[in-house]
Amino acid sequence: MPSFPQFRPRRLRRTAALRRLVRETWLNPAQLVLPLFVRSGTGVREPVGSMPGVDQTSVDELLRDAREAASLGVGGVLLFGIPDRKDATGSEAWNDDAPVQQAVRALKRDVPGLVVITDVCLCEYTDHGHCGVIKDGDVDNDATLELLAREAVSHARAGADIVAPSDMMDGRVLAIRSSLDMHGFKNTPILSYAAKFAGPFYGPFREAAESTPQFGDRRAYQMDSANAREALREVRLDIDEGADMVMVKPAGPFLDVIARVRDETTLPLAAYQVSGEYSMIQAAAERGWIDGERAMMDSLLAIRRAGADIIITYFARQAARVLRQEQQA
Ligand code: PBG
């Protein structure tokens, strides 16, 4: 390898055309997924205070957002539901007429080109806000599996293209796979939130999804942020149980984990740029402390560069717009 003055790395940075030619990593709207929050009613659009640009909507309004995303080339949507009623087991989660199930049917009818992914978890549906049923003050793993399986089957019955369990119970991928197969949904893939870390970055989401735990926190089921080797064990377990795709979450603070999981598996790898990552950029941009658009694009590029195929991000539409402008430029 020759060194200076024979070799000058700046030669390839001189023009935009040269930089474009040697660019190693590209973002594509087809691999962005937009999370959406759906509740009952019509004409409902409730802004989420902690997430500027994100709303809770009824199904009719959700269709407008989804159509816009599809027209920008965004690959898919990830649905979260806000139920009318919460109870101890989260039983609205497997109600075939609840907002998520209605939204799935409407999306498959009206925006068929978009991949519809549903988040499978109980925290939005339980009155205590935990991701499973409580026994003796603790989230009971095995009693929760059956309920998650019912929820996943209900989503598949509505027509979901992919179900995505985010609860972090042990054995849930196997339980969901078995139940889907038994109910005739052998072709419904599972995107497992395989390495999901507990922490502060989900704060704004809990306002959006109305899913704040009423006591304690999620550290007895979500992973400890310090553990990268354990993330690989979680990924291997979920793959053994039948996951078709795996996810690392959050994304930006866990780029090393994304890179290690990339080396570990040939399956499609998703990363979730979560609410806190989104809101930090939005808040700094609102104050004029950062160029929000460039920070958005750099944060997404970093996640791609680390090795994620698919990025779940609240920026999906804005990023798709920027990518389209870049292409036309
Ligand atoms: C449900 C779930 C959460 C997120 C996705 N699915 C919240 C949590 O675990 O508390 C967070 C997404 C985000 O912060 O954007 N368990």
Image: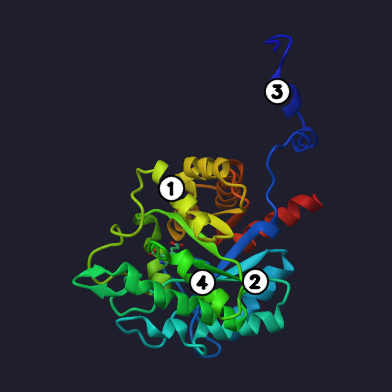
Mark found first going from the N terminus, 1 or 4: 4
For the residue labelled by badge 4, is the local secondary structure a helix, a strand or a loop?
helix
**Residue at mark 3:** 10
**Residue at mark 2:** 187
**Residue at mark 1:** 233
Q: Mark 4: few, some, or many residues within 10 Å (few <14, many ≥20)?
A: some
Real-space CA distance between mark 4 and mark 2, rounded to the nearest whole angstrom:
12 Å
**Residue at mark 4:** 178
Note whether 326 is above or below 61 in the view shown: above
Note whether 120 is above or below 286 in the view shown: below
Comparing labels 4 and 2, the label whose residue is closer to the camera: 4
> In the image, what residue type sits under mark 2?
Asn
Label 2 beta carbon less than 8 Å to ligand 1: no
Q: Quadrant of ligand 1?
A: bottom left
Mark found first going from the N terminus, 2 or 1: 2
The picture quadrant where one finds residue 109 is bottom right
**Could you tell me residue 209's position as x and y percent?**
42, 73
Q: At x 46% / y 83%, what residue is drawn? A: 94
For the residue labelled by badge 1, is the local secondary structure a helix, a strand or a loop?
helix
Real-space CA distance between mark 1 and mark 4, rounded to the nearest whole angstrom:
21 Å
Do the residues bearing badges 1 and 4 touch, measured as CB atoms within 8 Å?
Answer: no
Q: At x 20% / y 70%, what residue is drawn? A: 137
Comparing labels 3 and 2, the label whose residue is closer to the camera: 2
